[in-house]
Amino acid sequence: MIMLSSDGVSMHFGGLKAVENVDLEVRKGEILSLIGPNGAGKTTFFNVASGFLKPTRGQIRFLDREITGMPPHEIAAMGLVRTFQKTNIFAGITVEESVRVGFSLHRKASPASIIFGGRAVRDEDEEIGGRLREILRFTNLEEWSGSLVKNIPYGKQRILSIAIALAAEPSLLMLDEPATGLNPVETKELIDIILRIRGEKDITVFLIEHNMRLVVSISDRMIVLSYGEKLAEGRPEEVSKNPLVIEAYLGKGFQNVSQG
Ligand SMILES: Nc1ncnc2c1ncn2[C@@H]1O[C@H](COP(=O)(O)OP(=O)(O)O)[C@@H](O)[C@H]1O
Ligand SMILES: [Mg+2]
């Protein structure tokens, strides 16, 4: 089953073709990576797919519905939830409170009933409390739950942005360079979390990543962008041996991966 598809998507900024005529599909249950040199258009593609930019041309479909031009919160409510390349979490509140924000997308009780209380609100609060603890446990953030976000290690902040995204109950989770700035121990932890997100939560994962070892080790498929265009796609072992891909990455360490 196809979860997300892009049909001839272009995103131009003035004369700059940041994304040019990209066709791609994300299949249910897979871990798909979008890779490519800096400036290739990866983040721009994510911005278009998640509704933060309206494409110059082309269509995006999610779960058999056209979502091109829909606002990001509506797309997120349908189940397409993304994280950002730069952490955009709330430094002044606690880890637990920030994950709570992620739940607000699906909160059913009306604002008035939340203010004045009532059985439905208490039930919902209890349910959210349970799911909150589950997410903190799942992402190994339990011990930090009462800490202010600004006081936890950077790697934990990156994991926290994934926890917040999980609270919004995605069926497709899109991660923009989740391993940036992580040390090797944190990177291993991240890999484990991504594999469990797919394996245990049955969430499809579409990620942008620079760390080639990470990408090759966890992806079912890879798509390569270069200068906004799709350059190659396939299984990691094929893509990492593709001469066009190696050339696009020349001097950036990709050859090491293809040589094992
Ligand atoms: N809002 C914007 N306005 C103008 N140019 C942009 C904007 N966003 C991205 N770009 C340009 O589009 C190109 C692709 O950027 P980006 O998608 O961030 O690449 P990547 O994520 O692959 O490193 C770059 O040249 C970047 O400077
Ligand atoms: Mg980027």
Image (spheres, rainbow, N blue to C red):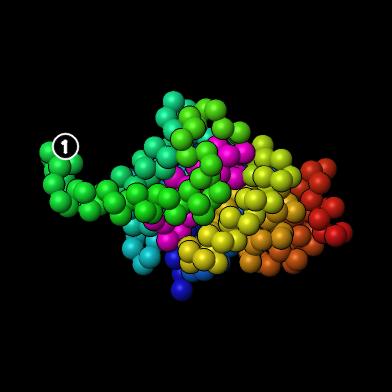
Residue at 71% across / 46% down in the picture? 185
User: What is the span of residues highlighted in magenta in the rendered image?
Assistant: 155-178
Closer to the camera in the image, 124 or 2:
124
Secondary structure beneath dot 1 equals helix
Residue 70: x and y in percent read 32, 49
Res. 229 visible in picture: no
Where on the picture, by quarter, is residue 178? top right
Where on the picture, by quarter, is residue 100? top left
Total numbered labels placed on residues in the image: 1
Hey, what amino acid is under mark 1? Ile
State the residue in front, 178 or 147: 147
Q: Is residue 126 magenta?
A: no
Residue drawn at 69 percent across, 51 percent down: 188
Q: Nearer the viewer, residue 102 or 140?
A: 140
Residue 159, given in percent of the width and then of the height, sits at 55, 44
Residue 251 appears in the figure = yes
| Residue position marked by numbered label 1 in the rendering | 115
The quadrant of the image that shows the C terminus is bottom right
156 in the magenta segment? yes
The structure residue drawn at horizontal position 46% and vertical position 52%, both measured from the top left corner, is 135
Q: Nearer the viewer, residue 184 or 56?
A: 184
Q: Residue furthest bottom?
A: 1
> Residue 34 in the image: x percent, y percent?
61, 54
Disc 1 packing (10 Å; few <14; some 14–19; many ≥20): few
In the rendered structure, the answer to whether residue 228 lies left or right of residue 65 reads right
